[in-house]
Amino acid sequence: MPSTTLRRALVRSLRRPPWSSEVRRDVRFIAAGLPSALPVWLAVTESRMLFAVLAAVLLCTRPLTALQRGRLRALYGVEIPPPRPVTGSRRLLLGLTWRQALHHLVVGPLLAAGALAVLYGAGAAVVLTTLYGWIWLMPPGTALRSDLAGTDVVLTVIGVALLVALPWAAEATARLEVWSARRLLGPDRAEALERRVEEITESRAGLVDAVDAERRRIERDLHDGAQQRLTSLAMNLGLARRTLKDVPPEVMQVIVDAHEEAQAAIDELRDLVRGLHPAVLEDRGLDAALSGIAARAPLPVRLDVELSEPIAPTVEAVAYFTVSEALTNVAKHARAARVDLSVRTAGGRLRLVVSDDGVGGADASRGTGLTGLRKRAASVDGSLSVLSPLGGPTTITVELPCAL
């Protein structure tokens, strides 16, 4: 596979003439990297300046790194994100890392030397391929003209070979510079993974907010549209049921059935709307919404709410539906006589504790409703734990972040 890739790159480079825009871009890019290597070359050639130049390069690591990233972006179209600044006990010389030092002191100067060789080869190729022109311009009988007369063909062939190799050499040098800059001047693998996790977390938070906003929109459309129409229909049917006295009994029975069906549809739609997003949660907050859940529960619920910190609307919705589903599970499976519900905020976290005096034995790993509760909590980076020994009691603890 590497040989195939190299062969394709060589063929692609050979197909590009030396005067093409891609070759000019590569040559311009590698030539722009020569000035940054001059201090290190000077330190190597002048040993007396070694320590002074090395200290200057180390102290100027940040501007040098920014300069290289700017060169890559402006001349080659490659964007390299900056690494995270080194802080705390790992901080060294204004944020210097060993990867940046390796690039500016070793890799960069070596690549610049390769770029200088490519540029020198390009100049030699131009001179050698035009050798016959130079010979023709020399006066007859010139010693240099007579010396070149025997080697003009060989030198011209060498010049053509250098000219053919120029696109490949320039591209290879440029790609090597890009590769080394990505590895040494950009974030390392750990930083890249950390940034990716942050991006995924932000994306998930945005998705959760979008889903919650969509549920609010559907709830609003149903409440203001279909529910109002059904209510108007039920009122008209009820009015007809009370006022029409001279209709046949079978017609009246149809009106009565239609009125009852409309009332049942309104009740079902009201439950559906409440399940999508309760209006009381948006109008009066989480405390009032949980009070409504406790009042509608089929068993006594003792509610204790203390909210001292602001809570994001999406987290409020997750908390509301988590409590609603938890109480539904208790009513269906726990055979409990009462439920204690505690809601607290502290340290930027919302803590929900649902305790019942039922038979216990709840296990989230068996695919019960607790699995859905855990997934709902995890959607906002929360957690759920269950303590339910056989014989009871059962305690469900949910912790959610107050802000996303």
Image (spheres, rainbow, N blue to C red):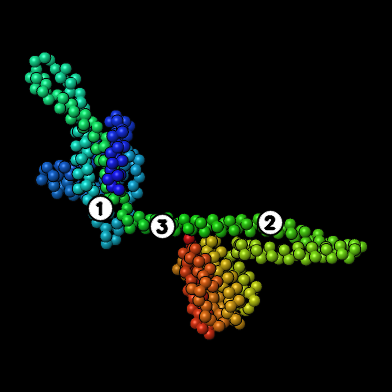
Q: Which amino acid, by three-letter code, is at mark 2?
A: Asp
Name the spot of residue 184 as percent of width and height, x first: 27, 50
* Distance (Cα) linking label 1 and label 2: 61 Å
Compared across the picture, whether 20 is left or right of 213 comes to left
- Which disc, if any, is residue 207? none
Q: Name the outermost residue toward the right.
A: 246
| Residue 258 to residue 172: above or below | below
Mark 3, Cα crowd under 10 Å, few <14 / some 14-19 / many 20+, is: few
In which quarter of the view is residue 79 placed? top left
- The residue beneath circle 3 is 198
Q: Which residue is drawn at 28% across and 34% down?
A: 14
Element at badge 1?
A: helix
Name the spot of residue 242 as percent of width and height, x first: 86, 64
Q: Residue at x 28, y 31 (%)?
A: 18
- Which disc, if any, is residue 224? 2
Compared across the picture, whether 43 is left or right of 306 comes to left
Element at badge 3?
A: helix
Between disc 1 and disc 2, whose residue precedes?
A: 1
- The residue beneath circle 1 is 99
Name the spot of residue 217 as percent of width and height, x first: 61, 56
Mark 2, Cα crowd under 10 Å, few <14 / some 14-19 / many 20+, is: few
Say how many tags the image has. Answer: 3
* Distance (Cα) linking label 3 and label 2: 39 Å
Q: Which amino acid, by three-letter code, is at mark 3?
A: Glu
Q: Residue at x 48, y 60 (%)?
A: 404
Name the spot of residue 219 as percent of width and height, x first: 63, 59
